[in-house]
């Protein structure tokens, strides 16, 4: 009996298929995922793969769920303090995403947006990562500002991540990440100080 068949016999094929799919994803991106190719690489017949995943969407959603769980685990290791600093958590987010670019793309729907958005497992693991990313805001801001601040924090880390993994930023941009968070925390003036709180022409 082959190693693949023994794994299947002992109930480990699901794990093997996920591991193989992750390897294929890392090598070639979300567009390369097919159950047939995953099964072939795992050394089993395609029907064996369908026994564990009803379709490719189910496999992709499970990978995305795992990705958000891994991201949350990475965020949990970021240093925190009583002031609720966001920079260490944001840097941990970007570091993890840059180490797993193709999985990160999949997590945010590349190629499988409908399946991922419909997955309760993805929503749960994404919610955990989201809560860890912005938990410091609750120590620093009144409740009325939390929705906007949460959107700002998520937009900042996600936008930086996509610029870096898509190589759309200037050379050396990664070294500026700490400065980006420092400026974000301090606030960047959007215009002359005298113009704030006044109507145009006032």
Image (cartoon, grey):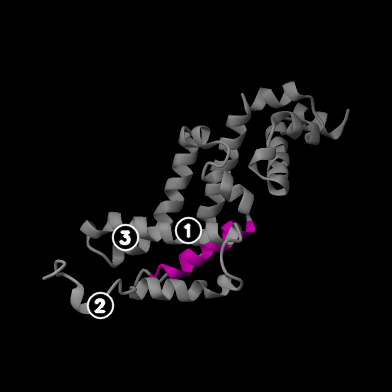
- Of the numbered discs in the image, which one, if any, rests on residue 192? 2
Query: Is residue 8 visible in this depiction of the protein?
Result: yes
Magenta segment range?
85-99
Residues 162 and 151: in front is 162
Q: Which residue is mark 1?
A: 159
Of label 3 and label 2, which has the lower sequence position? Answer: 3
Closer to us: mark 3 or mark 1?
A: 1
Q: Which residue is mark 3?
A: 149
Label 3 – label 1 distance at C-alpha = 15 Å
Callout 2: SS: loop
Callout 1: SS: helix
- Find out whether residue 97 is within the magenta segment: yes
Question: 201 above or below 133?
Answer: below
Of label 1 and label 2, which has the lower sequence position? Answer: 1
Q: Is residue 95 left or right of residue 90?
A: right
> For mark 1, does the 10 Å Cα neighbourhood hold few (<14), some (14 to 19), or many (20 or more) residues?
few
The chief SS type of the magenta part is helix
Residue 76, position as x, y percentages in the image: 49, 60
Q: Locate residue 49: give its quadrant.
A: top right
Residue 188, position as x, y percentages in the image: 34, 73
Q: Is residue 100 left or right of residue 11?
A: left
Residues 151 and 202: in front is 202
- Find out whether residue 116 is within the magenta segment: no
Name the residue located 78 percent from the left edge and 35 percent from the top edge: 42
Name the residue located 56 percent from the left edge and 42 percent from the top edge: 110
Q: Is residue 152 left or right of residue 194?
A: right
> For mark 3, does the 10 Å Cα neighbourhood hold few (<14), some (14 to 19), or many (20 or more) residues?
some
Residues 22 and 192: in front is 192
């Amino acid at each position: 009996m082959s190693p693949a068949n023994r794994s299947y016999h002992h109930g480990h094929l699901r794990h093997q298929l996920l591991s193989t799919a992750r390897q294929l994803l890392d090598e070639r991106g979300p567009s390369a995922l097919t159950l047939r190719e995953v099964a072939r690489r795992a050394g089993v017949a395609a029907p064996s793969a369908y026994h564990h995943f009803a379709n490719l969407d189910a496999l992709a959603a499970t990978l995305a769920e795992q990705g958000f769980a891994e991201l949350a685990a990475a965020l949990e290791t970021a240093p925190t303090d009583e002031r609720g600093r966001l920079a260490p958590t944001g840097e941990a987010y970007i570091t993890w995403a840059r180490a797993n670019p193709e999985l990160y793309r999949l997590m945010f729907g590349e190629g499988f947006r409908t399946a991922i958005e419909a997955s309760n497992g993805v929503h749960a693991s994404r919610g955990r990562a989201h809560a860890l990313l912005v938990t410091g805001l609750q120590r620093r801001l009144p409740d009325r500002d939390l929705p906007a601040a949460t959107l700002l924090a998520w937009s900042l880390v996600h936008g930086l991540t996509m610029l870096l993994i898509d190589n759309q930023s200037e050379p050396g941009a990664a070294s500026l990440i700490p400065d980006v968070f420092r400026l974000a925390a301090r606030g960047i003036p959007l215009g002359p100080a005298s113009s704030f709180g006044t109507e145009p022409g006032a």
